[in-house]
Image: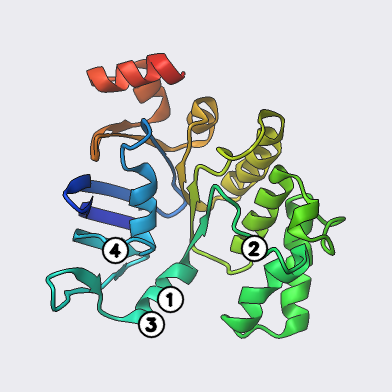
Amino acid sequence: MAAVAVRGLRKSYGNVPVLKGIDLTANQGDVISIIGASGSGKSTALRCINLLETPDAGEIEICGEVIRMRSGSHGQNGPADRHQIERIRRTAGMVFQSFDLWSHLTVLQNVIEAPIHVLQKPRKEAIDHALHLLEKVGLSDKLNHYPSRLSGGQQQRAAIARTLAMQPKVMLFDEPTSALDPELVGEVLRVIRGLVEEGRTMLLVTHEMRFAREVSDKIVFLHQGRVEEEGSPDRLFDRPESDQTRKFLRQHF
């Protein structure tokens, strides 16, 4: 059973097609990095997988469960079951490039909020788990700080801990270092590398090419809304078959 299976995924904004029939499969424990130029559809693909964006066509399957869709009165696609979408979003946790921490809550409160109110975890259990996660991401000394007192790298690590607190089966990373100053990128990549070593299933949209090559089981290169090329990191980086892939790698690697 695939952890994530996407078949024929399409998405347009108005008359502008962004995804033109994406196929993508991640097995349990796979780390797949999705690369490509700005506007190629990378982030849109991730946002469609956990239904932050509604695809126009195609099929999405998460851990054996196909997301049910239906056409509305105006012919637009939409989820058929809101409860299923809530369940899928717990299964596929997403880390955003802009951190999206709740500014009025401390780091600890950010991490325990969803487990208590969504998963109905007892408060003590949620706190104990949060303390473990904050130690894992190197923030055990910042648990009572508000996000405004943290660096960008610390905020992103807190956001990763918050996602982990929901115990997702799949983690989706949408350019998790793109909003960071260069000197802060390494601390976030170290945390992600630790999650890779735990055997977690991950889809990673990134512009960190060397990191993608080091940690990924497969690289998927998107170009103008299509999968232009995919393969093992060594094969794709060393022996790209597509002219577009070669051009992209010359510019970014």
Task: Identify the residue shown where x is 36% and y is 32%.
Answer: 36
Q: Which of marks 1 and 4 is nearer the N terminus?
A: 4
Mark 1, residues whose alpha carbon is within 10 Å: few (<14), some, or many (≥20)?
few
Residue lying at the far top of the rendered structure: 250
For label 1, the residue is 86
For label 2, the residue is 162
Q: Earlier in the sequence, mark 3 or mark 4?
A: 4
For label 4, the residue is 54
Q: CA separation, marks 2 and 1?
A: 16 Å
* For residue 85, side relative to residue 211 (left or right): left
Q: Is mark 3 on a helix, strand or loop?
A: helix
Amino acid tagged 2: Arg
- Rendered location of residue 116, percent (x, y): 65, 81
Amino acid tagged 3: His
Mark 3, residues whose alpha carbon is within 10 Å: few (<14), some, or many (≥20)?
few
Q: Earlier in the sequence, mark 2 or mark 1?
A: 1
* For residue 184, side relative to residue 245 (left or right): right
Q: Which of marks 2 and 4 is nearer the N terminus?
A: 4
- Rendered location of residue 150, percent (x, y): 78, 50
Q: Which of these two is toward me, 70 or 33?
A: 70
Q: CA separation, marks 2 and 4?
A: 24 Å
Asked if disc 1 and disc 4 are in contact, CB closer than 8 Å, the reply is no
Task: Identify the residue shown where x is 69% and y is 67%.
Answer: 111
Q: What element carries label 2?
A: helix
Q: Is mark 4 on a helix, strand or loop?
A: loop
For label 3, the residue is 83
Task: Identify the residue shown where x is 31% and y is 17%.
Answer: 246
- Rendered location of residue 195, percent (x, y): 61, 49
